[in-house]
Image: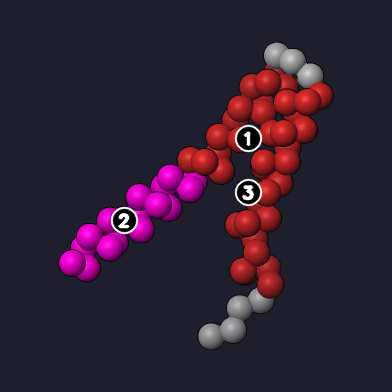
Amino acid sequence: MRRGLWMIFRWPLLLALLSFLGLFSALVGDEVYDLLSWLSLGVPLLLVGVVWRRMLQANRSRL
């Protein structure tokens, strides 16, 4: 099965853009920008946690 570049890199690009937005908004301003930075930096961490948990559950079910 052959995948296109967009299918391979769409999630990593989205996570990179969210992280960049979070870092940039943390540098630019206060108050609303701080909230935006916390949210945009937290979403990639949350997604990593969800995927990691699913992976662990899949490995346990195979045993």
Where in the figure is residue 16, as x and y percent of width and height? 68, 49
User: Is mark 1 in CB contact (under 8 Å) with mark 2?
Assistant: no
User: Is residue 15 positioned above or below 61 on the image?
Assistant: above
Decide: few, some or many residues near mark 3? Use Cα within 10 Å; few <14, some 14-19, many ≥20.
Answer: some
Instruction: Please report the bounds of the magenta region as a residue range.
Output: 47-63
The amino acid beneath tag 2 is Leu
Circle number at residue 56: 2
The amino acid beneath tag 3 is Leu
Residue 51 falls within the magenta-colored stretch: yes
Query: Which residue is drawn at the image coordinates 35% and 54% (left, top)?
Result: 54
Q: Which colour scheme is used?
A: secondary structure
Q: In which quarter of the image is residue 9?
A: bottom right
Decide: few, some or many residues near mark 2? Use Cα within 10 Å; few <14, some 14-19, many ≥20.
Answer: few
Cα separation, mark 1 vs mark 3, equals: 9 Å
Q: In which quarter of the image is the C terminus?
A: bottom left
Helix or strand or loop: what does disc 3 sit on?
helix
Helix or strand or loop: what does disc 2 sit on?
helix
Q: Which of marks 3 and 2 is nearer the N terminus?
A: 3
Which is closer to the viewer, label 1 or label 2? 2
Circle number at residue 15: 3
List the single residue furthest toward the top: 31
Decide: few, some or many residues near mark 1? Use Cα within 10 Å; few <14, some 14-19, many ≥20.
Answer: many
Q: In this view, does 48 lie to the left or right of 15?
A: left
Query: Which residue is drawn at the image coordinates 49% and 46% (left, top)?
Result: 47
Q: Which of 52 and 6 is in front in this view?
A: 52
Q: Earlier in the sequence, mark 1 or mark 3?
A: 3
Cα separation, mark 1 vs mark 2, equals: 25 Å
Where in the figure is residue 17, as x and y percent of width and height? 71, 46
> In the rendered image, which residue does mark 1 sit on?
40
Q: Which of marks 1 and 2 is nearer the N terminus?
A: 1
Q: Is the magenta stretch mostly helix, strand or loop?
A: helix
